[in-house]
Amino acid sequence: MQFSLAVLPGDGVGPDVTAEGIKVLQAIGNQFGHNFNLHYGLAGGVAIDETGEALSRDTLNMCRHCDAVLLGAVGGPKWDDPKAKVHPEDGLLALRKGLGLYANLRPVKVFPVLVDSTNLKPKVIEGVDLIFVRELTGGLYFARPKRQWRTSRGRRATDSMTYSEQEIERIVRVGFELARGRRKKLVSVDKANVLQASRLWRQVAIELAPEYPDVELEHMLVDACAMRLIQNPAYFDVIVTENTFGDILTDEASMLAGSMGMLPSASLAGVPKKGVNIFGMYEPIHGSAPRRAGLNMANPIAIILSIAMMLRYSFSLVREAQTIEAAVEEVLNEGYRTYDIMSEGKKKAGTREIGDLIAGKVGG
Ligand code: IPM
Ligand code: MG
């Protein structure tokens, strides 16, 4: 089959890990007889340096015309000045909004062999297999008003946590649908004891529940969820939540898997369904780690697992996705580790070695 893919390597370690992801994708193409046509573009700091904008209209249009988008990472100290007019992250937000990618899926799965690489006790993280559904195009990140201004009594700034019932409904539905295909437990996370936006969120979730009688719905306050994620993470199956809450909780949850370098993500423009190709953008949840850039250090597993998600959700190539996931697990089982998940007695490997090893297994 033929697929077109927009590739935006971005900044820092973005290009390092993207190259390994593409290596693995090409191996899949060779092995299973698919053709992935790659269209490279600029996003983030590199785009600011080149064009003055974090994402040009042409690049956004190029992405729109592809079947999926692969993104490395954006950001870095060079563009961090809070007074700057444009930031690399603006490019990422413009992609999410401009492509209508409202559903951000972040699975957290603990590989048994990595149980020793985390800071948490093995008995706490054993059996963790959960997935976050983070709302990605609304809430505090996007809703208006959003601005800074001067008053006679000093400077002020505001961001708004505004949601329409339609925005809440479509993301909570994604949570219900995913739960249906898993262990049938959905936790909707909010701050309904304080925030109006959360009260509406909870109300809409309650109203939808009768349509999914096979799924058990529980509401949890975001602070309690932060605690429970460390206390008993195996408790969770599917978690659906607001944009900012999801941003914070998923960094926390990444520690369950040992490292941010292990966690993939999919940002989708619709409800994932078996056999239906949904447009999406795929990226590791880690940042650009500028100090590690170009040093063959970064862990490419997060982007490689993101490619597996792309094969599954955007291309309906389930067997191919499973092949990548199995190859990742094998390489870990054989003891190869990048620095972030290194532990005693294991074999230290660089970005490229891990990419080669996984591609080698995929390619038969
Ligand atoms: C993430 C990142 C982004 C976010 C940043 C880079 C804008 O932290 O994808 O979680 O806050 O959404
Ligand atoms: Mg984040």
Image (spheres, grey):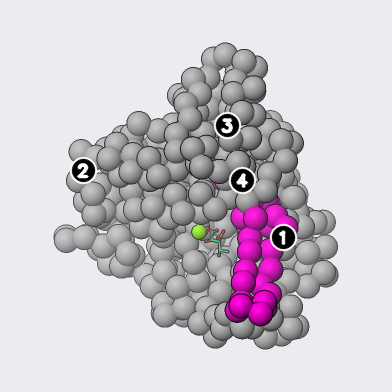
Question: Mark on residue 145?
Answer: 1
Q: Within the image, what quadrant is residue 74 found in?
A: bottom right
Which residue lies under the disc numbered 3? Answer: 202
Residue 9 seen in this snapshot:
no
In this rendering, position of residue 325 left or right of residue 36: left
> Which is nearer the N-term, disc 3 or disc 1?
1
Q: Mark 3 and mark 2: span between their CA atoms?
A: 34 Å
Check disc 1 and give the amino acid type: Pro
- Picture layout, residue 228 above or below residue 57: above
Magenta-span inclusion, residue 38:
no
Q: Mark 3 and mark 1: span between their CA atoms?
A: 23 Å
Disc 4, SS: strand
Magenta-span inclusion, residue 159:
yes
Which residue lies under the disc numbered 2? Answer: 122
Question: Mark on residue 135?
Answer: 4
> Which is nearer the N-term, disc 4 or disc 3?
4
Q: Mark 2 and mark 4: span between their CA atoms?
A: 31 Å
- Residue 57 screen position, x and y as percent: 82, 69
Residue plotted at (77% across, 57% down): 98
Residue plotted at (64% across, 29% down): 204
Bounds of the magenta segment: 131-160
Disc 2, SS: helix
Check disc 3 and give the amino acid type: Arg
Check disc 4 and give the amino acid type: Glu
Check disc 2 and give the amino acid type: Pro
Residue plotted at (49% across, 66% down): 287
- Quadrant of the displayed image that contains ligand 1: bottom right
